Image (spheres, rainbow, N blue to C red):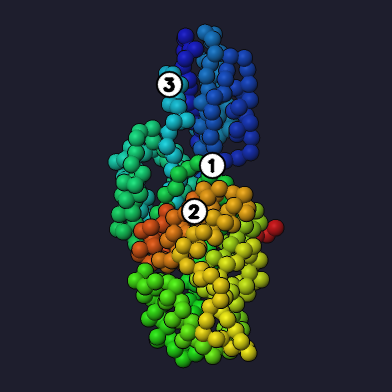
Amino acid sequence: MQENENKQVIVTVTGRDAPGITSGLTEILNREGVRLLDMEQAVTHGLLSLSLVIQFVGNGSADVAVLKDLLFKAKELGVNLDFTIVEGDAPARSSATQFAITLLSEDLQARHVAAIAAVLARRKVNIDSIRKLNEGGLSCLELITYTNSQIDVGALKDDLLKVSSRFPAVDIAVQRENLYRRAKRLVVMDMDSTLIQVEVIDEMAKLAGVGRQVSEITERAMQGHMDFDESLRQRVELLKGLSESEMKLLADRIPLTPGAEVLVKTLKRLGYKIALISGGFSYFGEKLKEKLGLHYVYTNVLEIEGGKLTGRVTGSIVNAQRKADLLELIAQQEGVTLESVIAIGDGANDILMLKKAGLGIAFNAKRKTQEAAGAAINQKTLASILYLLGITDKDIEDVVKL
């Protein structure tokens, strides 16, 4: 190689991973006239993939000697080495638009990845890296992508949503890949059918013998077909006479959603604050706060006299607007921006809250809520939400052990 001032060389190394490979090769580059510009390394199932971008400075003959020494060293180390000469600098990424695309399924297959890749290619979006986030079989991949072209983000999300519709068992979440994704600090979640598996008011209604009436009102409210405040008053009125002792028995047996404890414990260990904002009731919310160590709980308060419900709610009703306002209030108290907030919910009265947060996640939600949220997850476990933050199973295991 001559007149190599503007020439760069991409060195690619593959083979069985072992200690000393990277150190042995980079030591050869430690000489005058050689500049290391970039490098990336990954190990998949014990196989190493190492890429080095180097530049030879000046017009000397160091390039030939260095490349020859690299080839000899690679042979000695038992790995394959190839190189490619490129002209000029690599395209700048500073102006590129980046996305993190997370794929979740109990059984991710090549056809799912192929469908996503086809959408990205059609939209002129390049895949920068692909990382498996779960342990064991393939069930979660994170794709970091970029494009230097103008892109309609809404259209991209619509295209990916169509892929998810073709494969209902696959969840696809799209986020901007920026500092805010990695700097989330507050998680706000709904209670009923989100943090816990049931709608508490329906369970209370069964105890009071008014299950059918209350369930019908609940469903209309959750679907957005009825004013929440009025529906709550109607349902609570039907619960009049239910004893506090019966509520305690119910609170003791309410099942948490699978993965709830792992989600909360992991996030708390990582420094997140956790808030429960629910149209449910304080009696049960406070029990969950105590059990899980939540930082904030805002719920509706049932009036109790003589150990029994009066059929009335006291104080301000926590409805859709109140949920969104409380999210903003907590963010202000914690000194974080709305971009740094994650909101999780399943019903129509969660939509405003989900839209206000930097990342709104519809968890096993009604269709209307899924369409309004920034991401929709239809997995069995709440812990799957951690994948959207780029947290791996290994990360979770390490954090939970602390």
Q: Earlier in the sequence, mark 1 or mark 2?
A: 1
Can you identify the residue that label 3 sits on?
86
Earlier in the chain: of badge 3 and badge 2, it is: 3
Q: Residues within 10 Å of mark 1 (few under 14, many from 20)?
A: few
Q: Quadrant of residue 314?
A: bottom right
Q: Is residue 112 visible?
A: yes
**Mark 1 or mark 3, which has the lower sequence index?**
3
Q: Disc 2 marks which amino acid?
A: Ala
Task: Give me the residue at 39% from left, 36% from top.
Answer: 147
Which residue matches tag 2? 357
Residue under the point 39% across and 71% down: 227
Q: Nearer the viewer, residue 243 or 271?
A: 243
Question: Residues under labels 3 and 2: Cα distance?
Answer: 44 Å
Residue 49 at x, y = what percent? Answer: 51, 37
Q: Quadrant of residue 288?
A: bottom right
User: Can you give x and y, in whole percent of width and height, for residue 364 in the image?
Assistant: 43, 66
- Crowding around mark 3 (Cα neighbors within 10 Å: few <14, some 14 to 19, many 20+) is some
**Left or right side of 250 for 82:** left
| Name of the residue lying farthest toward the right | 402
Q: Give amino acid for label 3.
A: Val
Residue pointed to by mark 1 = 179
For mark 2, give the secondary structure. Answer: loop
Rendered location of residue 342, percent (x, y): 52, 55
Give residue 338's position: percent from left, percent from top. Answer: 53, 50
**Badge 1 amino acid:** Leu
Figure check: 370 above or below 98: below
